[in-house]
Image (spheres, helix red, strand yellow):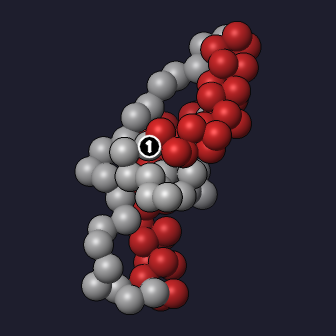
């Protein structure tokens, strides 16, 4: 989508253990800190490529959901794949 993104993030048991022990290569103690690091890196990179005085590129928050089974994962994957076909229905769509 031109105005937002979707993604799936896998945190394995071994990664969760490394995060809890403080031995992970990524400095993360929660999903929130992972998202914050991602947003920070993307913001810095985008500002190096464009005018830094442009409007903010991130909403204040994000939506998260724990995928608990294959059926849910498949539904979410389909939503992500089909989402661009609904761009013309987005309130920010400009023809």
Relative to 70, does residue 14 appear above or below in the rendering?
below
Residue 21 at least partly seen: no
Residue 38 x %, y %? 49, 59
Is residue 84 shown left or right of residue 93? right
User: Crowding near pointer 1: few (<14 within 10 Å), some, many (20+)?
Assistant: few
Task: Tell me what residue is drawn at x 37 percent, y 45 percent.
Answer: 91
Q: Nearer the viewer, residue 46 or 78?
A: 78
Residue 90 x %, y %? 44, 43
Q: Nearer the viewer, residue 44 or 85?
A: 85
- Count of marks overlaid on the render: 1
Residue 49 at least partly seen: yes
Residue 63 x %, y %? 40, 35
Task: Tell me what residue is drawn at x 64 percent, y 40 percent.
Answer: 85
Task: Tell me what residue is drawn at x 62 percent, y 28 percent.
Answer: 79
Which residue is denoted by mark 1 in the rendering? 90
Relative to 15, does residue 71 appear above or below in the rendering?
above
Q: Nearer the viewer, residue 34 or 45?
A: 45
Residue 8 x %, y %? 62, 38
Relative to 61, does residue 12 appear above or below in the rendering?
above
């Amino acid at each position: 989508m031109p105005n937002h993104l979707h993604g799936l993030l896998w945190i394995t048991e071994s990664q969760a253990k490394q995060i809890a022990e403080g031995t992970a290569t990524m400095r993360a103690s929660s999903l929130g800190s992972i998202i914050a690091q991602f947003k920070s890196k993307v913001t810095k990179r985008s500002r190096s490529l464009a005018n830094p005085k442009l409007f903010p590129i991130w909403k204040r928050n994000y939506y998260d959901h724990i995928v608990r089974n294959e059926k849910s994962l498949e539904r979410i994957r389909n939503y992500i794949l089909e989402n661009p076909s609904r761009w013309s229905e987005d309130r920010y769509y400009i023809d």
